[in-house]
Structures are given as structure tokens and as C-alpha cells.
Amino acid sequence: MPFCQNCGSEVNEGAKFCPECGHKQGDAPVTEAVASPTEPAPGAQPKPKKKRSRLLPITLAILALLACVGVWLTLGGSSRRPIGTTERLSAWTRRGRGDSMLDVSPISGKGYRQAKVKHDGKSNFQVTSYRGDQYIDLMIDEIGGYHGILRWDERADTLEIKADGAWEIVVSP
């Protein structure tokens, strides 16, 4: 059986790499054992094996964790309130039946994020947002009953609702 040209370990016939040290084997592997550089010479003291330092991977893991926490805190953590807001926002709810114009200026620009909307009618249901008398968006245009969640547009100060039945809007932070 041939031996590794680098460390002297046994290598299978035709192997391209040594299973011990990984050294690439040439076309003609050595057929006699070569003294391994890891084996001490006769009469010499054996060197203790070096232990791999675990300090570097642990330090890198701690630094990565601290970086993640720093980014999380910088971007607001789990708080959904806008930066600078000290008051706790509560849900804003309005219910009605039929067509209506809603003044939403008290919640405009306050950090509200979504609106849950329900309509129990059988005909057309539309919710349109305005800023002053300027059209912003046709938020909902459905036929029949509707249950859904919308992304709230903070620019709106008025909602126009066209409905044939009962409706409810709950705007939340």
C-alpha cells in the first residue's frame, strides 16, 4: 500500500488526496513509510498538540449579537409608535349605515397604520379618501359585503363612504 508524500500516512491505491493531511498525491506515491513530521525522533520529547482557540468564534458571535440588538433598538425595537410620540394610540372606530362623510383629521398624521373595514350591504360599497377637497385614493370599491384590512393613508383628513348597508371602520396604530 502506498504512503503520503507529505505526512507518511497510508493512502489507498489511486487516491488523489491523503485522508490524514489532505495533501495532493502525485502520480507515483511513496511505497515506503516516510517519517511523519508529527512523530518525534527517537529520544525526543513529544510536543503537546495545539488546541484551537475558541476565543475568536465566541467573540465574533457576541459582536454579531450586539450589532443585531443595536440595529433593532435604533429602528424602534418592537414599538409601533412613531419616534417622538409619547402618548399611546388607541383604536379609532366609526359605525354607520348608508352614505356618509367622515372627518378623520383628528387621527391624520398621528401614526395610525391600518384600517379594518366591514360592510354588510348587498350593493356597491366605496370608501374614498380626501385631503381638503383634493382626491387621494379610492380605497375600496366592492359590490356586496366586505371585510378587509387596509393600509391607512395618514394624509387623509376626510373619508367619503357610499354604502347601502351597515358599515364599520376601525383605524389602529
Image (spheres, rainbow, N blue to C red):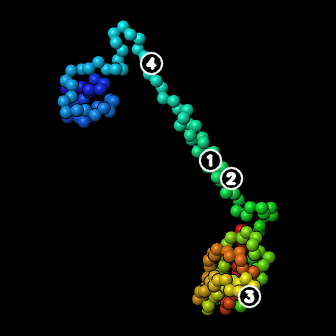
Residue 48 got which mark? 4
Closer to us: mark 3 or mark 2?
3
Question: Label 1 crowding class (10 Å Cα cut-off): few <14, some 14-19, many 20+?
Answer: few
Question: What amino acid type is highlighted by mark number 1?
Answer: Ala
Q: Residue at x 67, y 83 (%)?
A: 136
Q: Residues within 10 Å of mark 2 (few under 14, many from 20)?
A: few
Report the disc number at residue 34. Answer: none
Q: Is residue 145 above or below residue 19?
A: below
Amino acid beneath label 4: Pro
**Would residue 117 be found to the left or right of residue 14 on screen?**
right
Question: Considering only order in the chain, which callout, 2 or 1, is on the residue closer to the N terminus?
Answer: 1
Q: CA distance from mark 1 to mark 2?
A: 10 Å
Task: Give the spatial CA distance, label 2 vs label 4.
Answer: 47 Å
Near-viewer residue (93 or 15)? 15
Spot occupied by residue 106 in the image (x, y as percentages of width and height): 80, 76
In the rendered image, residue 117, in percent from the top left (x then y), is placed at: 66, 79
Write down the quadrant of residue 64 in the picture.
top right
Q: Which residue is mark 2?
A: 73
The residue to which callout 1 is attached is 67
Q: Secondary structure at mark 1?
A: helix
**Label 3, label 4: how many angstroms apart (C-alpha)?**
84 Å
Specify the quadrant of the image occupied by residue 47: top left
Is residue 120 something one can see in this rendering?
no
Q: Give residue 133's mark.
A: 3
